[in-house]
Amino acid sequence: MTKEHEFNVLAHIREFHLLWMPSGESLAVLGDSARLFDNADGDLLLAPSGAFSDRKLVAAFEASGEHVWGYVFDYPCSVSIEEAGVGEWCAYPTRGVGYAVSRDVAEAVCAASFSRMNNIIVGRIRPTELLLMPDAVSLAALGDAVGLYGDNGSDPDGNLWLAPKGAFNCAALDAALAAGGELIVGYEFEYPCGVAINRHLPGIIKPGEVKVYNWCGYSSRGIGYALSHDVAIFVCAASILAAQKDKNG
């Protein structure tokens, strides 16, 4: 990220109560709940203790599992132990979240994950002047230009109605402003694959999902728009990661 948008790792880490399991074999006592440890990066077996019933926790303790205080952190991109530079953590890229017992380890892995995300989106985001419309009803004032807010016959992804100012003629802009539209400076970004807003996501992003608002995306045109640079980063990364996942099967 640029210096103007310097990454603050501490904003993406918080203390958390975890279940630590000693080995892959010990997971058998958890039955179906063992799936919470599937597809993990890192070298430990950690999961939020609140995700397990009391009965499962008792079984875990009998198999030498332990309750530990640790840290949960956002994990937008998969990284190896070598890339993170530390061990004693685990993370789940399909959920966008990771866990560590040590804050120092959580900071290192979280930073490495965001660094990789930043490498993915470098050069794919740029400032642009946008027309923000207040709601779907206001779009009627645009006449034929209303199609600029459509995505293959449906609404765009995200929660806002945004389109580039330069795509409208003077008459359409005047009508838009009279209907409550607003001209703003925001950000345009590459958007190769659809992204959904999931407010229950444990991390801030995962491939194809984000926990941020104030953006819209048009997958049919491969372009998205956001009010802030940070939101543009997260949505752009989630879209690119989803496209890579689709390509790799």
Image (cartoon, grey):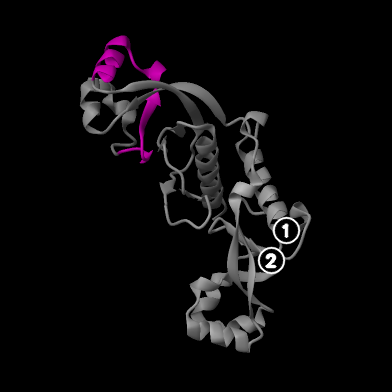
Q: Nearer the viewer, residue 12 or 245?
A: 12
Residue receiving disc 1: 105
Alpha-carbon span between mark 2 and mark 1: 8 Å
Q: Residue at x 53, y 59 (%)?
A: 95
Asked if labels 1 and 2 touch by Cβ distance under 8 angstroms, the answer is yes
Per the rendered image, the range of residues in magenta is 155-178
Image spot of residue 98 (x, y percent): 61, 60
Disc ID at residue 243: none
Residue receiving disc 2: 101
| Residue type (three-letter) at the residue carrying disc 2 | Val
Please say whether residue 173 is one of the residues in the magenta stretch: yes
Query: Relative to residue 154, is residue 58 drawn left or right?
Result: right
Q: Report helix, strand or loop for mark 1.
A: helix
Please say whether residue 124 is one of the residues in the magenta stretch: no
Query: Relative to residue 54, is residue 168 drawn left or right?
Result: left
Task: State which quadrant residue 92 falls in.
Answer: bottom right
Q: Is residue 103 above or below residue 17?
A: above
